[in-house]
Image (cartoon, helix red, strand yellow):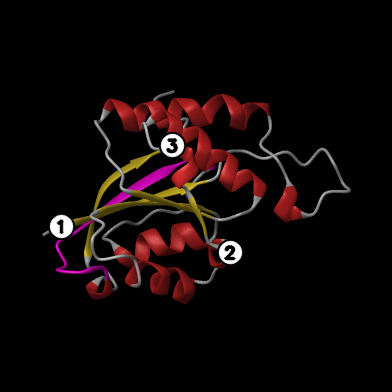
Amino acid sequence: MSHKLTLVRHAKSSWNNDDLQDFDRPLNDRGLRVAPEMGQRLADKKYNVEAVISSPAQRAISTARIIAKEVDFNVDQISLNQDIYDASLGVLVDLVNNLCESLQSVMLVGHNPGFTVLANYLSNAKIDNMPTCSIVQIKFNASSWDAVSEHSGELISFDYPKKYQ
């Protein structure tokens, strides 16, 4: 039985308000324009997700909601996980290893550098940097999420906003 993990780095955020904490930064105009496009690319691939788990940072949850709408995932069902914000590789691997076994397809929405490091660690990918609003999909032939480990997955997709420009 295969499992599919989708990693989404949040869309471009705004640095316009110096009074905001990093955690509270919203998406900027480009982020608001690109996120639906990236969600539509997933929808065009007939993407089916059973769970969306997001960092609670404003830019991440906004990205999660926009992409969830595009793939017909109920935005009210998005889970927030504080551990994703500013997470180390070990924390992210633990999160994946502890996903509910009944789920076959899970989307995580979060941040760099953790997501680029995670993508390379879990798969055969050699990604220098996941740009904002990029999407990595990894397939595992592991029998369970807790069997997912270093290089146990296969990179099946790496998409980003400027890929087709």
Q: Position of residue 142 (x, y in %)?
A: 16, 67
| Range drawn in magenta | 132-145
- Look at the image and say whether residue 137 sits in the magenta stretch: yes
Mark 3 lies on a secondary structure that is helix
Q: Is residue 90 magenta?
A: no
Q: Visible in this render: residue 50?
A: yes
> What is the crowding at mark 2: few (fewer than 14 residues within 10 Å), some, or many (at least 20)?
few
- Camera-nearest label, 1 or 2: 2
Residue at the far right in the pictured view: 19
First-in-chain label (1 vs 2):
1
Numbered mark located on residue 2 in the image: 1
In the picture, the disc for residue 128 is none
Give the quadrant of the C terminus.
top left
Separation of marks 1 and 3 at Cα, in angstroms:
22 Å
The amino acid pointed to by label 2 is Gln
Up-down: is 103 above or below 9?
below
Residue 108 location in percent, x, y? 43, 53
Residue holding disc 3: 68
